[in-house]
Image (cartoon, rainbow, N blue to C red):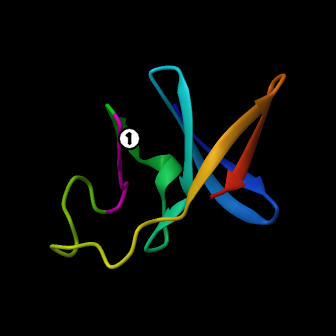
Amino acid sequence: MLRRVIFSEESILVANVNGKLYAISCTHHGAPLNDGELDHDVVICPWHGGKAINPTPIMDLPVFEVLTKESDVLPKKR
């Protein structure tokens, strides 16, 4: 499951990987990652597929800790 959420005016991608929730910045060079696919524990960019656009990433995407409260998902920046 890939789902885009807005939290504190920031677009965040939440992914369910084997029952555990993970969250990262929702865009990759402007591409909406929530329109991509989840291959095990790797998010495949909907624009770039499995191809890297650079041999080495320029920077890591921001990562969030995911807290849950009842049915609410609360991303917290690390």
- What is the total number of numbered labels drawn onto the structure image? 1
Residue matched to label 1? 37
At a point 75% along the width and 55% down the height, the residue shown is 6
| Residue at 71% from the left image edge and 52% from the top image edge | 76
Check the image and name the residue furthest to the left.
Answer: 55
Can you tell which quarter of the image residue 57 is in? bottom left
Question: Residue 6 colored magenta?
Answer: no
Residue 54 figure quarter: bottom left
Along the viewing direction, whichever of 5 and 74 lies nearer the viewer: 74
- The residue carrying pointer 1 sits among few (fewer than 14), some (14 to 19) or many (20 or more) residues within 10 Å by Cα, namely some
56 shown above or below 11: below
Which percent across, then down, holds residue 73?
75, 36
Asked if residue 44 is among those painted magenta in the image, a careful observer would answer yes
Residue at image position (63%, 55%) is 12
- Tell whether 50 sits left or right of 68: left
- Could you tell me the amino acid type at mark 1? Glu
Q: Callout 1: helix, strand or loop?
A: strand
**Residue farthest toward the bottom in the current orientation of the protein:** 58
Question: Residue at point 15% right, 73% down?
Answer: 55
58 left or right, relative to 26: left
Residue 13 at what x, y percent from top left?
58, 50
8 to the left or right of 26: right
Which residues fall within the magenta stretch?
41-47
Measuring from the top left, give residue 11's x and y in whole percent.
67, 61
Quick one: 52 or 31, which is closer to the camera?
Answer: 52
Percent from the top left, x then y, of residue 5?
70, 49
Q: Nearer the viewer, residue 12 or 34?
A: 12
Image quarter (top left, top right, bottom left or bottom right) of the C terminus: bottom right
Is 3 drawn above or below residue 63 in the view shown?
A: above
Above/below status of 29 relative to 66: below
